[in-house]
Amino acid sequence: MILTAPALALATLFAFVTPAHAIPSFARQTGWSCSVCHTIYPQLTPIGRLFKLEGYTTANLAGMQELKQKIRRMAPLELNRVPPLSVMIQASAAWIQGGDANQFGSGGTTGQGAVEFPEQVSFFYAGRVTRNIGTFFHVTYTHTGAFGMDDSDIRWAEHQTEPDGSTLIYGAEINNTPTEPDLWNSVPDWNWPFATSNYSPLRDIPATYIQQAAGASEPIAGLGGYLAYLFGPGESHWLYLEADVYRSAVGIGSGTDQFFGAATLGPTRNVAPYLRVAYEQNDEEWNWEVGALGMDATIYPTTAAIGSTDRFLDFGLDGQVQYLDLTGNQSFTAHVSWIHETEDWQADPAVGFKPNPVDTLDTASINGQYLVNRRYGAGLGYFWAWGTPDPALYGAATGNPAALVSANGSPDTNGLTLELNYLEAQNAEFTLQYSAFNKYLGASSNYNGQGQSASNNNILTLLMWLAF
Amino acid sequence: MQRPLLQLAPLLLLLFTAAPITSAAPRTPPKPPARVMTSCYMCHSTHGDDPRFGYIPRLAHQSESYIVEQLKAFRDGSRSDPPGEMYMWPVSQALSNRDIDLVADWYASQPPPPPQPAGPLTQAGSRIFHDGILKQDVPACMSCHGPEAAGNGIFPRLAGQNVEYLIEQLRFFKSGVRHDKNADIMHSIAIHLTDHEMREVAEYLTTLH
């Protein structure tokens, strides 16, 4: 399938952010409850970050069966007595203020609110494979009616202690989503809100390439390595470096749309490098992180890798602050992120698609979540997107549904999200979420020139999440 | 045919002559046991001197026999308290007796954790530790844990321990949620301590080296 130019513009406009969560197979392997590694899914604690750094290989329960070798020097074999399989089910019901016309995900025809059962079903193989190799691997069924690869990685990890007491953890990984290997929830693949309805206008906010790639939504695979240096008193200072190169790959790239299906953007030309650096400091109940990331993706405008290319140059800064009072059973985590993208539309313009030579797009968010007794939670966040007006990307020329058209060609959008969480158990969560838009695609009122107000996209969602 | 001892003579000569040179070379620091590096260090830190959270105990320089006893108690479920059940029960189930000995030896042989600076409650805590609170039937802590809180037999080392860990355990003893074969001793004491007095004695203990 070759995407048309308007389809490309549509793809550029839409952000398919697929939520991902903690999984019980890790709990079965470690014997630890979910709350050792997570506050609420998928927000990681420092122990969870270490578990990920160690390649998901930490295993406390005697779940590994070592098959004794009769021939010396033969490679060892350890197998899980119970395969690390898990299932995750999500369902949702959403009510959008503007009614059917603003239910983008469904084409807007239900007339009775957007109910999804399931919104998403994921099957995981996640856990230790060998002493040094572990997986976080899953496929997801979603509202489109098909299974697709979701954000996954397979990693090899090793560590060593230095004479001064510091620890060096290093690893290599393959993954299908930039920022999926990351340790903090301030990066696109793991950022809050952790779940939204497929119908939510939140998913249609203009997004940078690196955000669009979240949830394995682009046709790329990455090979990379990481290094974490834990130093200082109590190894409380962490320096994290990660480098990956991404290139087009078969079998992924349609996110949850199709298993071997169409991509939202075309393949990469050569490889797209990704770099990440972050610093974390732990101080008793508090820990905080600051980091930067960057990606340089040169992309063919259609799924045929011919002709000239477009270039998306992303640079981002992020931060996270976390308070964990586990004896008092309360936690608070806040994230802040900003990503700037330069879109260099170098490819030969297709018929009907003539963007500016160069556009910029910025996105930012700030949010915080509070959880008490691992049972009741609340979250509040604000989000922004702004950039160069470009009717080819955001205007009527895109062919988008009327509610996704900007009359002035602007991507400018902002609003807030509020949610309340109730955990019936650590693996059963119910969320009531409300998002309100102050501005949508360039204006607060009549943003599409056909009478739509930003508030028409306000959405109330009831979400259910089960994992077992 | 040479006699075996004569065959070894050059080697023995080399060993004896090399001995002073070997002893003068810098000593390679011992490596932590594999279990420490695959599990324990994630919470307790490699050297046990500065755990990741305040409610996790410092294990550096703790009595080896005490660590062994506690790990076995976690493993067979005879020691229980909420964090112990959450974190240590699964961890200890994976430990063999040999693992436990290695882990205990490692942490016991580490230097004592650095003492924390004195705070406004330290002096009051020192009085409780050394003299007890007679009118509340609280005996001096030092009578069991030693004058320097270095531990003694079944009584653990408390010097330099994390404040939050000490307070939490005292509360567990008081409320009765901590169970182990010696918990009754501490329960009978902790029920007479107020929260403020627990903090006082904890803030004193953390200043000891």
Image (tube, rainbow, N blue to C red):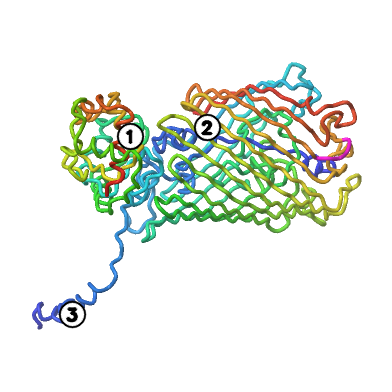
- Tag 3, which secondary structure? helix
- Vertical placement of residue A413 versus A165, above or below: above
Residue positioned most to the bottom? B1
Residue B197, given in percent of the width and then of the height, sits at 30, 31
Asked where in the image residue B18 lies, by quadrant, the reply is bottom left
Are dots 2 and 3 on a single chain? no
Q: Which mark is residue B17?
A: 3
Dot 3 crowding, Cα within 10 Å, few <14, some 14–19, many 20+ = few
First in sequence: mark 1 or mark 3? 3
At 66% from the left and 36% from the top, the residue drawn is: A256
Question: Looking at the image, is mark 1 or mark 3 nearer the viewer?
Answer: 1
Magenta residues span: A407-411
Residue placed farthest to the top in the image? A112
Relative depth, front residue between A71 and A75:
A75
Residue A340 placed where, x, y %?
72, 49
Residue A314: percent from the left, percent from the top? 70, 51
Q: Which of the two discs, 2 and 3, sits closer to the camera?
A: 2
Proximity of marks 1 and 2: CB atoms separated by less than 8 Å:
no
For the residues beneath circles 1 and 2, the answer to whether they share a chain is: no
**Callout 2: residue from which chain?**
A
Task: Answer with the quarter of the image where residue B89 lies.
Answer: top left
What's the amino acid at mark 2?
A: Ile
Marks 1 and 3 sit apart, C-alpha to C-alpha, by: 58 Å
Identify which residue, A252 or B126, lies in the foreground: B126
> Mark 2 highlights which residue?
A40
The N terminus of chain A lies in quadrant: top right
Question: Number of numbered discs present?
Answer: 3
Q: Where is mark 1, residue-wise?
A: B199
| Kind of residue indicated by mark 1 | Arg
Residue A454 x, y percent position in the rendering: 80, 29
Given contact means CB atoms under 8 Å apart, are the residues at marks 2 and 3 in contact?
no
